[in-house]
Image (spheres, coloured by chain):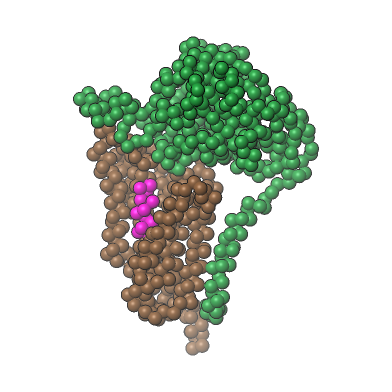
Chain colours: A green, B brown
Amino acid sequence: MNTTRSLSPRARWAVPAVVAGAVAAAFAVPATVGAVASDDLPAVTADELVDRVANAEPVPVSGTVVYTARLGLPDVTVSELQGAGPLDLLGGSTTMRVWSDGEDSSRAALLGDVSEYSVVRSGAEAWTYSSADDEAVHYVLDPADQERYDELAQQALEPDVEGDVPTPSELADVALAQARISTDVETTDPVEVAGRAAYQVELTPQTDATLVDRIRVAVDAETWLPLRTQVWSVQDAEAPALEVGFTDVSFDVPEASVFEFSAPAGAEVREVVVPLPEPGTMEKPSSSALGEDADVAVSGTGWETVVEVSEVDVEAILGATAEGRLPEGSTGSSGADDLFEEFTDAEEGELPGVPELDTQALYEQLATPVDGGRLLTSALLTVLVTDDGRVLAGAVPPATLEELAG
Amino acid sequence: MSLAEAPVAETPAAPARATARLLRSELRLVFGRVRNIVLLAGLAAVPLLIGTVLFITQDTPVAGQGPPFLDRVTGNGVFLVFAALVSCLPFLLPLCVSIVSGDAIAGEAGAGTLRYLLVVPVPRTRLLLVKAFAALAYAGAAVAAIAVVGLVAGAAFFGVGDVVLLSGDTIPLAEGMVRTLGVVAYVIASLTGLVAVGLFLSTLTEVPVAAMASTVVVAIVSGVLDALPQLSAIHPGLLTHHWLDFGEFLRLEIDASTLLAGLAVQAAWVAIFGALAWSRFTTADVSS
């Protein structure tokens, strides 16, 4: 008491300055220390590294993943109002929690402020759940396909889930698949990702005709699991256009309850039967999702690959996914329903005051009209939808697509 | 017992008794003031109001819309607590906390009672701590009032049951209650930084309204800055940035590091503005 009383006013005012300095130091220090000895890793060649990743035993993993996209798309996300959802992935930073048992069960949760979008997979069955809409979607195979799946269970087949969530390894697999074709592969200095020592490999396309400038994949030195994938576009040499990486990772087996999901009471549940692709057609987009007569053609190789799908009914796809319709009879009487429709836009059927996403409007906002169709450009992918019902897509400049479309 | 021993034994006890007396009178002052009681009642009325509105509109087309958790309330009354907290966090709670913490020192100075208070045999540092504790107790009472009234009203209107988490998983009601307690504790802890800011501003002026208003402004400006994507670099350090992180308690696996990050930011604001308030209050000339 006496010592504090004897402090001069000037000394007393020094205290907040010291406290502020200490606080700043406390927040800055953990960011710099705690570095693991990533320099001590035995050297590996680029080829060896790519092999190791391709042949690595799948391991159980869980952790936090941060996904950042700078694709140059118009900002269409209103996650504050809509809650977390797959559209968050179009731009900005998104935090996800992921769990995987290393076999056929996995779970990913896209986190928003007091909202969450979950994708839970268990064998051939998958669920998505959005906390904002309180809607669960159950993806299953039909019984015949299920039998076939059980026979093929040793093959790593996974059901197609709408609004899938990207993980560092998924993106890395796509990139490393290109490693042998028209690509320069080199290792860079080891890095540290999520507190783990990691090798890093850099893939540079040999061609100039692609939007991809270079890709870096950081691979855990013990488990050979990709921990971070960064993709640079030719448009921006500084910041990666796409970055997915763990900020926190654990290789303990997640609790089995994590992968057990059932629709919560009161939630709206939709059942979707997904076709199991015939062996050999895995690479092609399933044509039933695009329209009855859709036909898929691939031109170019490696980084210049352009996928062309013809006879696509764009209007129908946009119409089918339009959301926000008032369910029949939700007001309890047909008279009230009619009255309600009178007062709201009957075309849209949306409830007033709720910013539901209109797919048609979104499409028109994203795709700019060009000669003979509509063009969607982003830092890494270009899509051309022609007026005669063809869709061309590839990691190539718009001019290439327009030339191919003729 | 010799005469010489007696004072030695009593000296440490006497200030402690005086501090306890001061704390009791301070709590009586804060919780006895009509204005503060009315504010508390107003906050407690929020869940009651939301519950009543939802109860009346639950069978109409507008049901199931609005801010987070609102659509869950009719299915499970527990969610009324969260819906009410989400509604009060942006403005009403900071307002009440600002009024009480901004009034702490400036109110006494404005009324001319501060110099009498300083005659009490309690050092200024301890007096400041007593004031801070009373303001924090009020903040805690405000959050608790919303939670308790929300739970009671929710149970009465809609009943309570197993809690569906944000991830879609269902947990038993008992565990849901424990997590609700966690939410309440986190929200109270989230307000400590604002209490420290209010206390510091309160030491700067003799006009209590000025201190209250500027504290509210700090909270609101923080919220506005948090909404500007261009400033994302400074967002993690903002006073209000982590307030909604209480949603972490409603996820499948509670990630302690997310909660600790929010608490660390509050601790930093408390340390800096607490130190500023201490420097100001222990060096100021008090003439009124």
Residue at the (36%, 53%) spot, across then down: B91
Residue at the (40%, 39%) spot, across then down: A81
Residue A244 visible in the snapshot: no
The x and y percentages for residue A124 are 53, 21
Q: Tell which residue pokes out farthest to the front in this image.
A: A371
Q: What is the count of numbered marks?
A: 0
The x and y percentages for residue A283 are 60, 18
B166 displayed left or right of A243: left
A52 displayed left or right of A120: right
Is residue A232 shown in magenta?
no
Q: Quadrant of residue A76?
A: top left
Residue at the (31%, 62%) spot, across then down: B36
Q: Main secondary structure of the magenta part?
A: helix
Residue B82 visible in the snapshot: yes
Q: Tell which residue pokes out farthest to the left in this image.
A: A335
Range covered by the magenta-colored residues: B85-97
- Along the line of sight, which residue is nearer the eye, A378 or B27? A378
